Image (cartoon, rainbow, N blue to C red):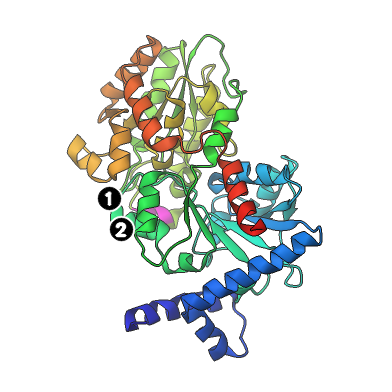
């Protein structure tokens, strides 16, 4: 093992040690055990054998799904598939991320209620005497998660599975894909599931990884299965459009959000066009960025929009007969029942695309070359099937096309959906569950 790899492994190990904050005995012996990939593979084999013996005793496989916040919950269809299989005992492990507490009051309790209202079993502690067999996480870096017990040698006791919650459409490909799919921590995971062929190739580019599985995105199961009605729409014969603004309205070449530029235009348009209905679906961080004085200063948004202006806008918007707002939670029925989306949100670029409905991306950049530069190969192919607006006039033109029932890019969307977004269409959760089951049963 070369020096660079040893240093990375030491940093990885220390991050876990600091994360869980307990002084360890036999430090040197346990550290050396983590240095060897061969030792790690032997440990996975040992854990699988232990689970196999548990199955033979007619006991269920316990699976915990780490839930950080509603917006990052991507494992519902995997949970459902396991709940319907007598071999598994799935539970949601609620451990709110540190940063989330500043965005939403009572974040942990709200998240618990979100899952209990779905009749899902929730746990908030890990019992070190009764650890789960498998943990699913949407983050490889767990340092910002509130664990309540020592997990300093968790990889020796639990099989970890990883599915990164966002669809990666942005950024210089190697840098961004390495961030999500090739950090040091993931090589100690048992399985890594990825949503599309671009992500699969990026994850497999690391020669030491043999645990990557192309599965499709579990969120698509929920999108396809969602009802075509939604209580957020107020009218019956209106054209129904979602406006999904991102939180990144700061002054930077990396910023994507355009909310502060167009929110007054949207409001005035709704007042004058009762035949169009728009539900606002803002990023959960947007109000936090506007309301937090320190964030406003750090991100240089002090001149964009005040909290009073934002709250007045929201109140006026949702009191219109053709305006409403969805703050958080399941948005799949909203997607399914809509006619189009206007957005500057990266994840929704792929998520909404699966329904093959018209989309308009609001660019913060002033030309298409600069705008497309910050998308990867797959992202740019998705953009080919999306309208791109650089000013309000182009956004208004898109809305008028929707009102008239025009859709020139339907076939382009269909082609890119088939290429990237339909892996295991409608049964991603079942595929992942079956993959795990087959491996554990031998």
| In front of the other: 125 or 37 | 37
Q: Quadrant of the C terminus?
A: bottom right
Which residue in the protein does label 2 denote?
Answer: 175
| Residue 355 visible, this orientation | yes
Which residue occupies 25% across, 31% down? Answer: 390
Measure how far apart labels 2 and 1 are at the Cα level. 19 Å
Which residue occupies 48% across, 52% down? Answer: 213
Which residue occupies 46% across, 10% down? Answer: 275
Name the dominant secondary structure of the magenta segment.
Answer: helix
Tag 2–tag 1 contact (CB < 8 Å): no
| In front of the other: 12 or 280 | 12
Task: Give coordinates of residue 69: x percent, y percent.
Answer: 58, 50
Disc 1 on helix, strand or loop?
A: loop
Q: Quadrant of the N terminus?
A: bottom left
Task: State the mark number for residue 186.
Answer: none
* Quarter assignment of residue 389: top left
Which residue occupies 50% across, 86% down? Answer: 32
Which residue in the protein does label 1 denote?
Answer: 252
**Residue 298 located within the stretch drawn in magenta:** yes
* Quarter assignment of residue 408: top left
Are there few (<14), some (14-19), or many (20+) residues within 10 Å of tag 2? few
**Residue 257 located within the stretch drawn in magenta:** no
Disc 2 on helix, strand or loop?
A: helix
Q: Which residues are magenta?
A: 295-299
């Amino acid at each position: 093992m070369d020096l660079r790899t040893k240093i990375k492994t030491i940093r990885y190990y220390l991050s876990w040690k600091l994360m869980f904050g307990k002084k360890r005995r036999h430090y040197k012996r346990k550290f050396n055990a983590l240095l060897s990939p061969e030792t790690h593979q032997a440990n996975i084999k040992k854990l699988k054998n232990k689970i196999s013996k548990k199955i033979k005793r007619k006991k269920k496989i316990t699976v915990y799904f780490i839930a950080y916040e509603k917006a990052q919950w991507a494992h519902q269809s995997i949970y459902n598939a396991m709940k319907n299989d007598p071999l598994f005992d799935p539970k949601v492990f609620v451990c709110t991320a540190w940063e989330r507490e500043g965005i939403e009051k009572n974040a942990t309790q709200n998240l618990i209620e979100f899952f209990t209202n779905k009749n899902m079993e929730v746990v908030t502690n890990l019992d070190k005497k009764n650890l789960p067999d498998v943990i699913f996480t949407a983050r490889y870096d767990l340092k910002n998660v509130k664990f309540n017990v020592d997990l300093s040698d968790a990889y020796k006791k639990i099989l970890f599975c990883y599915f990164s919650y966002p669809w990666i459409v942005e950024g210089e490909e190697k840098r961004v894909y390495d961030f999500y799919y090739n950090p040091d921590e993931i090589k100690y995971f048992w399985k890594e599931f990825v949503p599309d062929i671009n992500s699969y190739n990026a994850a497999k580019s690391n020669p030491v990884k043999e645990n990557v599985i192309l599965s499709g995105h579990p969120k698509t199961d929920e999108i396809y299965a969602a009802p075509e009605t939604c209580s957020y729409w107020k009218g019956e014969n209106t054209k129904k459009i979602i406006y999904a603004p991102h939180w990144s309205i700061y002054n930077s070449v990396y910023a994507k959000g355009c909310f502060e530029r167009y929110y007054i235009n949207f409001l005035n348009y709704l007042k004058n066009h009762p035949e169009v209905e728009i539900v606002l679906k803002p990023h959960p961080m947007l109000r936090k960025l506007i309301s937090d004085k320190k964030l406003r200063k750090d991100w240089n948004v002090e001149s964009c929009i005040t909290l009073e202006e934002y709250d007045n806008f929201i109140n006026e918007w949702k009191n219109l007969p053709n305006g409403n707002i969805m703050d958080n939670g399941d948005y799949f029925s909203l997607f399914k029942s809509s006619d189009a989306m206007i957005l500057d949100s990266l994840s929704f670029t792929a998520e909404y695309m699966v329904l093959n409905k018209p989309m308009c991306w609001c660019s913060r950049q002033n030309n298409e070359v600069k705008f497309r530069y910050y998308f990867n190969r797959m992202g740019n192919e998705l953009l080919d099937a999306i309208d791109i607006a650089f000013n309000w006039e182009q956004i208004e033109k898109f809305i008028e096309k929707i009102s008239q029932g025009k859709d020139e890019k339907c076939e382009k969307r269909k082609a890119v959906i088939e290429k990237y977004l339909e892996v295991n269409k409608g049964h991603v959760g079942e595929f992942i569950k079956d993959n795990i089951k087959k491996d554990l049963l031998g």
